[in-house]
Image (cartoon, rainbow, N blue to C red):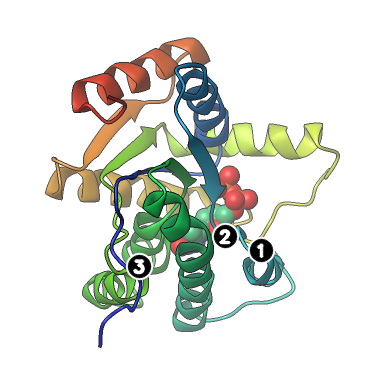
Amino acid sequence: MTSGIKKPAAGTLISFEGIEGCGKSTQIALLAERLRAAGKEVVLSREPGATPLGLELRKILLDPVYSPDSLTELLLYLADRREHCRLVIAPALQRGALVLVDRYVDSTWVYQGFARDEVETSLIERLNRLVVGDFWPQLTFVLDCPADRGLERARQRNLESGVVGVADRFEQRHLDFHSRVRQGFLVLADVAKERFRVIDADREIAMIHNDIWQKLILQDAVS
Ligand code: TYD
């Protein structure tokens, strides 16, 4: 079976990955601002929840009321991704835009596969390929920081946004799980060195941003 989603024409797809609280959203926003100032058409997106159907799936996926098994969870993330790819990523890349996504194929490999060891990562890899077709990221930044630092930041973020004491289903998991997630991204980055750039995210925001910018320039992704 083929994915049925047409090949991208001229755009560039860049994904951002990392544990909770690693600072992805801040960095993506800064990068988008700089790229737009340089005259690029930038599309910002995220998973789960970038489409109307995806938003419904996001509510289900992050609601602590449910406890789906790994396979059910995997299928829900893939459904979200398929919609995202078809309705947001494919059209943007076909018009030649630069698409920055907050989480994508590698989050599934790590969270539903590597970190839990219940669904084989080779199956996840195949399903990811089927779901996104040609829309594989050209470049992936892993924002790497110790799990306890990330969780602390995620808790802080919840406090500041007023959701006192309410962690989502993923934030409720133990530190060991988040350490496995961190390790999973590093394993992926080691296997596919040409696609991945690991960024030390345990630094000041401006330093991290400049590091990402330099690596993007080196990659010629913004020329
Ligand atoms: P979100 O609130 O967007 O958090 P973050 O700022 O950390 O990205 O929550 C997304 C959650 O979904 C996050 O805990 C990771 C998880 N996730 C998966 O488990 N598998 C996936 O394929 C994706 C895209 C996300």
Identify which residue, 142 or 101, lies in the foreground.
Answer: 101
Within the image, what quadrant is residue 51 found in? bottom right
Q: For ligand 1, tell me if the residue under mark 1 lies within 8 Å.
A: yes
Identify which amino acid the numbered label 2 is placed on.
Pro
Q: For ligand 1, tell me if the residue under mark 2 lies within 8 Å.
A: yes
Q: Quadrant of ligand 1?
A: bottom right
Within the image, what quadrant is residue 47 found in? bottom right
Task: Count neighbours of disc 1 (C-alpha within 10 A) and say few if under 14, some if 14 to 19, many if 20 or more.
Answer: some
Q: How many numbered marks have been drawn onto this rendered protein structure? A: 3
In the picture, the disc for residue 48 is 2
Identify which residue, 39 or 165, lies in the foreground.
Answer: 39
In percent of width and height, residue 145 lies at 41, 31
Distance between mark 3 and mark 2 Cα atoms:
14 Å
The residue under the point 31% across, 73% down is 124
In the picture, the disc for residue 132 is 3
Q: Is residue 69 left or right of residue 208?
A: right
Which residue is the site of mark 1?
Answer: 62
Distance between mark 3 and mark 1 Cα atoms:
22 Å
